[in-house]
Image (cartoon, rainbow, N blue to C red):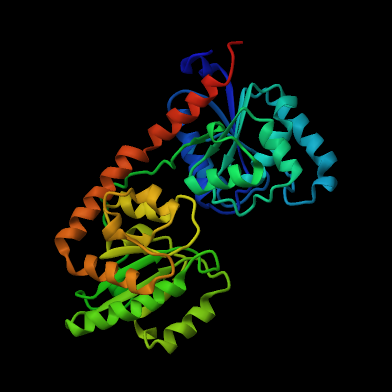
Amino acid sequence: MPKVQDLKRKLIVIVIGTLKGMGGAERQAILLAEELLQRGFKVKLIAFSGGSTETVLQSKGIPYTVYPFNSYQPFKRNLIPLLKLTLFLRGLKPYAFIPFITLNSKYIGLVWKLTGAQFACWNQRDEGREVYGSRLERWSINNVPVVVSNSWPGRNVLIEKLGVAASKVSIINNGIVLPEVQEKAIDWHDHLKLSKDTMIVSMLASIYKFKDHTTLIKAWQQVQAQLKARNKSGVLVLAGTFKGMETALKVLCFDLRVADSVYFIGTTPHTNDLIRQSAMVVHSSNLEGCPNAVLEAMALGKPVVATHIPGHEQALGDTYAQQCLSHPNDDKDLAAKMIKVLEDKALAKELGAYNRQRIKDHFSIEQMVDHYLGLITRYTSAS
């Protein structure tokens, strides 16, 4: 078995789908590539379409190639393009492939042995929404020596739908950058025209069916009533891409008479400032992998209250489960936990410190990279 240092002479190819935007998977792929390069490894990133993220790669000095390939096209129509992709990848003389997201894992799983590479993995980056249980998926995942998932739910869906042995799946937590203290770029109280004593509660997530903003808004009605009874003020700020649910949720806010305290702000480049200036971060969802939004709030030392599902428990741990994890679809329980954190300053401070330390202990970039390198050395033989 080769040592980790021996891999520095080999090319590690990281495959992502698109450079048109920077989602969680793309951020993790870039963090992985950046850390590997800093350690002296040879890395190349392959994307199937270009876009604005290319400037990020260029600024960080990450070698990359955009190879046009429509991974969303039906498989039968992709046979010739897939053959051409295989020949292109073979020309790189790769040693190891690390694909990101399910779709890329499917294609790399099919062809990696034809490229001359010695290693490839299936890399599950979500809770399994693109895993269907097809024969092609089963063949692909059985064709790689090891399966990676960044979450417990992602692992479980592969076991249930594709029949993968639990022993074949390695959990590699996302790597999270611990932000340095910086001067704020935006004052959210000023931006939203709020008084300085108004408490901000935020949730950072796309506004669509895979989240549970409905339960959160119902809970917020109860939180607002409690705050007003104590002559305090607060707002709920929902940051995230609008994907079809925003109108119905705004109607719900109007019906519950909380529309004046709920802000739908869409996407913002100032998420860290929003988190820092929030009294608390909430993540209401019934199905998650291990959400970056929660991890990023933890890294900034903020208390987080979230739905009690496996992905949130993986992120937050179980030490403060009674205080921070609410029953799914239970707005009363969610409201009670939010009110407790907002009213108990000592508890909020304790939770924030615990969350930041948990990121250091379990979600560091260094640990993430070490785990990937460990898998490559374990599943390859000396050349």
Report the number of numbered marks.
Answer: 0
* Residue at the spot 57% in from the left edge and 69% down from the top edge: 243
Residue 108 visible, this angle: no
| Above or below 208: residue 41 | above
For this orientation, the residue located farthest to the top is 383
Say which quarter of the image contains residue 363.
Answer: top left
The residue located at (22%, 68%) in the rendering is: 340
Which residue is pictured at 38% across the width and 55% down the height? 294
- Horizontal arrangement in the rendering, residue 242 relative to residue 109 (left or right): left
x and y percentages locating residue 18 in the rendered image: 63, 48
User: Can the viewer see residue 87 in this picture?
Assistant: yes
Rendering coords of residue 80 (x, y %): 85, 39
For this view, does 246 lie left or right of residue 189? right
Q: From this view, report whether residue 236 is shown above or below residue 152.
A: below
Describe residue 39's horizontal placement relative to residue 342 as left or right. right
Q: Position of residue 298 (x, y in %)?
A: 32, 52
Measured from the top left, where is residue 81 in percent x and y?
81, 41
- The answer to whether residue 281 is above or below residue 172 is below
Relative to residue 164, is residue 19 depicted above or below? below
The residue lying furthest to the left in this view is 346
